Image (cartoon, rainbow, N blue to C red):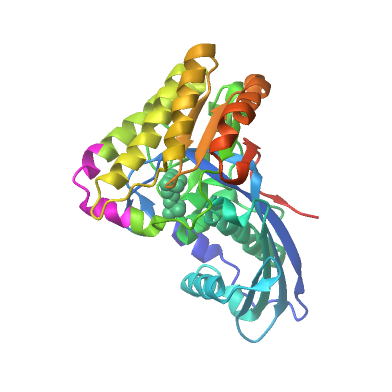
Amino acid sequence: MEQTWIKEAYSDELPEVFHGGVKWQSPSNIALVKYWGKKGIQQPQNPSISFTLKQCRTETSVFYEKSDRFGLRFFFDGKPQPEFQSKMEAFLIGQRDSFPFLDQLDLQINSRNTFPHSSGIASSASSMSALMMCLLDIERQAKGEERIDLRKASYFARLASGSACRSVLPKMALWGETDVFEGSSDDYAVSLEDAIAPIFKSYHDSILIVSDAQKEVSSRAGHALMDANPFAEPRYAQAKKHVKELLEALGKGDLETFIRITELEAMQLHALMMCSEPSFILMKPNTLNIIQNLHDFRKETDIPVCFTLDAGPNVHVLYPDQHAEIVERFIMDELERYCVGGLWIPDQVGDGPSPVQ
Ligand code: PMV
């Protein structure tokens, strides 16, 4: 697949006058079946499934101008960010064969997130997917093409930051090869939009911010810990089974199975961190307080609300649109007290990246 893209990459001399700007927004995503453990070059040890979000987004603009060599300046919230600039530069230089036209461009990149920096929400998925959409848009213009190939965007977003590959697709995405979904691949994510019941297309994810501290362990280090984790193989086998079961439940609109697998996956991710060496406890007391309250509420009301966790203490509360009012009232009355500064972010399933005017 990569070979074709390299061959098709725009490697001609850019027109004498070639300058302009592109601007894209791309959302974050939340995994239901988790990717935790890598192989090869940024490939997952097991397939994962995610909701694409709507409100938690990165907006990135790239101003480009023809130049005799590659140049890059990166600004976040209007301020230079040398550390991220170096990472981005290293990544793009590493992808030279795929983006040879970059050697003729000077880029100025401006980025901002729609969610608070202190919220602890991972921004690499939204930022890397937004950047890829901008780069592919510039290439599209140089080639005079109509549209951007989302599979290609997903492929390169994955190389920049694993789970970012799922953010380019609307509603729900599957990343990683599984024999139960034709076209699935370890190289890029595919859309599940046509394979899921309507109830999941407007699902809510309210993100309860339990701590705004910096991540205790980077996801790069977390993935690496799986290499020596004694439970790695059974975990990968179970995640593959969960993908099959969840795909079936998503198709049928089976909320009971959805809830069972989603919560089990969150707990397994954290259990894996606890039994890694060194070991990490990423939940906080208020993470458990929220989970306990949520379970009591579900038992009392029979409302199909559940949770998932990222590799951190914040709790993603998931529920169908038809129960939004009552669940959000419950969050305000009973759960907000466990959030740092009372902060929670009401988000929902969304449509993936789009150009910003
Ligand atoms: O994409 P990375 O390397 O930041 O890893 C993401 C890991 C989890 O968020 C914990 C799980 C996932 O599938 O998104």
Q: In the rendering, at what x and y percent does residue 274 appear?
A: 28, 45
Residue 128 within the segment the image draws in magenta:
no
Q: In the rendering, at what x and y percent does residue 297 appear?
A: 51, 19
Nearest the eye: 224 or 159: 224
Quadrant containing the N terminus in the rendered view: bottom left
- Residue 128 shows up from this direction: yes
The residue sitting at 55% across, 44% down in the picture is 209
**Relative to 239, does residue 112 appear above or below in the rendering?**
below
Q: In the rendering, at what x and y percent does residue 2 appear?
A: 45, 59
- Residue 248 shows up from this direction: no
Q: In the rendering, at what x and y percent does residue 211 appear?
A: 51, 48
Farthest residue, direction right: 357
Corner quadrant of residue 348: top right
Nearest the eye: 33 or 330: 330
The residue sitting at 68% across, 22% down in the picture is 325
The stretch of residues the image draws in magenta is 223-234
**Relative to 337, does residue 99 appear above or below in the rendering?**
below
Main SS, magenta residues: helix
Nearest the eye: 254 or 144: 254
Farthest residue, direction bottom: 68
The residue sitting at 34% across, 53% down in the picture is 223
**214 with respect to 130 (left or right):** left
